[in-house]
Image: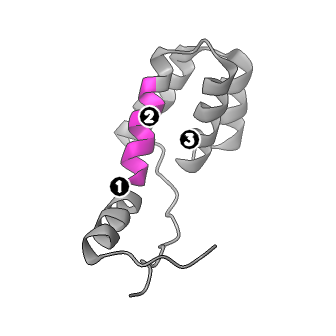
Amino acid sequence: MAERDFSRYQKKVIQRYYDNRPALDEQRLAELATDKKKPKLWETAKEIMERLGTPASRVEHVMKTNDPAQVAEVVKDVQSGKIRPKPEKKIDPPKE
């Protein structure tokens, strides 16, 4: 991938996005819990649960049941702190 020149402002925006990614994932998962009709949405929910550090056995259970209420329970546990997001690797901003 070609190196890109980002302005200082762009670098800060990119860094804030990655700093806030767990919160964005949590919000997205909550939104997906309300609309569970399409298989692609279930796959997205699975990816987000894995990124948030949900135990694999629980992810499998939620995926087998295809029940939005189960996803809502995962969201509740994430929000209450029972499930803690995995620490992400820090991505260094592009060099000037």
Main SS of residues in magenta:
helix
Residues marked 2 and 3 touching at CB (< 8 Å):
yes
24 shown above or below 15: above
Q: Position of residue 39 (x, y in %)?
A: 69, 20
The one of 1 and 30 positioned closer to us in this rendering? 1
Spot the residue most to the left.
9
Residue 62 is covered by the magenta coloring: no
Q: Where is residue 76, by image quadrant?
A: top left
Residue drawn where x is 42% and y is 53% of the image? 21
Residues marked 3 and 1 touching at CB (< 8 Å):
no
Q: Quadrant of the N terminus?
A: bottom right
Q: Which residue is mark 3?
A: 48
Residue drawn where x is 63% and y is 43% of the image? 55
- The kind of secondary structure element at disc 1 is loop
Residue drawn where x is 52% and y is 57% of the image? 86
Horizontal side of 53 relative to 61 (left or right) equals left
Horizontal side of 19 relative to 65 (left or right) equals left
The magenta stretch is: 21-31
Badge 3 or badge 1: first in the primary sequence: 1
Horizontal side of 35 relative to 9 (left or right) equals right
- Name the amino acid type tagged 2: Arg
48 shown above or below 69: below
Badge 1 or badge 2: first in the primary sequence: 1
Q: Where is residue 58, by image quadrant?
A: top right
Query: How far, Cα to Cα, is label 3 from label 1?
Result: 14 Å
- The kind of secondary structure element at disc 3 is helix
Q: Which residue is mark 2?
A: 28
Q: Position of residue 90 (x, y in %)?
A: 47, 73
- Name the amino acid type tagged 1: Asn
Residue 24 is covered by the magenta coloring: yes
Residues marked 1 and 2 touching at CB (< 8 Å):
no
Q: Position of residue 14 (x, y in %)?
A: 37, 64
